[in-house]
Image (tube, grey):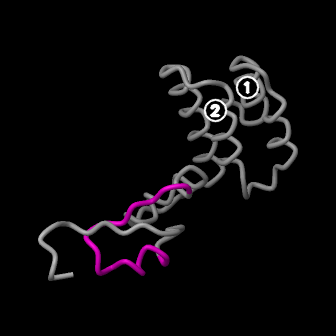
Amino acid sequence: MDNFNIPVVANGDVRDLESARRFDFCDAVMIGRHAIKEPFIFKELNNEKVCDWEKEKRECIEKYIKKGIEFGIGIQNMKVHIQSLLKDTGRKDLITGVQKIHDVEELIARMKQEFSF
């Protein structure tokens, strides 16, 4: 990469530290879809440990709902992102339940019921 006079940013299916290392020759790595499903990837890439995976997922969902309300994100977009956060949790019942929610108040009530926030 010494031939370039500009920073080189890599992108391509970065899911964890190991897959990011494929791009060690670049100046930076861009992470897309996987960051929605697994926002802790940034901690992992910075060598920070995720201590309580479920607690941190719950906190992400709570923060996402608050920011969604603050910035006027529609219920459909909120549901899609929360379902992504819930993937790989073994909670297909909850993911299916989120699909059936019609408004933000119902979403908040369901998440409080599930996660006590």
Residue at 39% over, 61% down = 30
Return the x and y of residue 53 as percentages of the image width and height: 62, 55
Q: Secondary structure beneath disc 1?
A: helix
- The amino acid pointed to by label 1 is Leu
**Distance from the alpha carbon under mark 2 to that under mark 1:** 9 Å
| Residue 29 part of the magenta-drawn span | yes
- First in sequence: mark 2 vs mark 1: 2
Residue at 84% over, 30% down = 100
Q: Which residues are magenta?
A: 18-33
Residue at 29% over, 75% down = 26
List the residue tagged with mark 2: 78
Image check: 44 left or right of 53? left
Q: Which residue is more in the foreground, 58 or 79?
A: 79
Query: Is the C-beta separation of discs 2 and 1 under 8 Å?
Result: yes
Q: Secondary structure beneath disc 2?
A: helix
Quarter placement of the C terminus: top right
Q: Which one is in front in this view, the residue at disc 2 or the one at disc 1?
A: 2
| Residue 113 against residue 96 in the figure, above or below | above
Question: What label sits on residue 107 in the rendered view?
Answer: 1
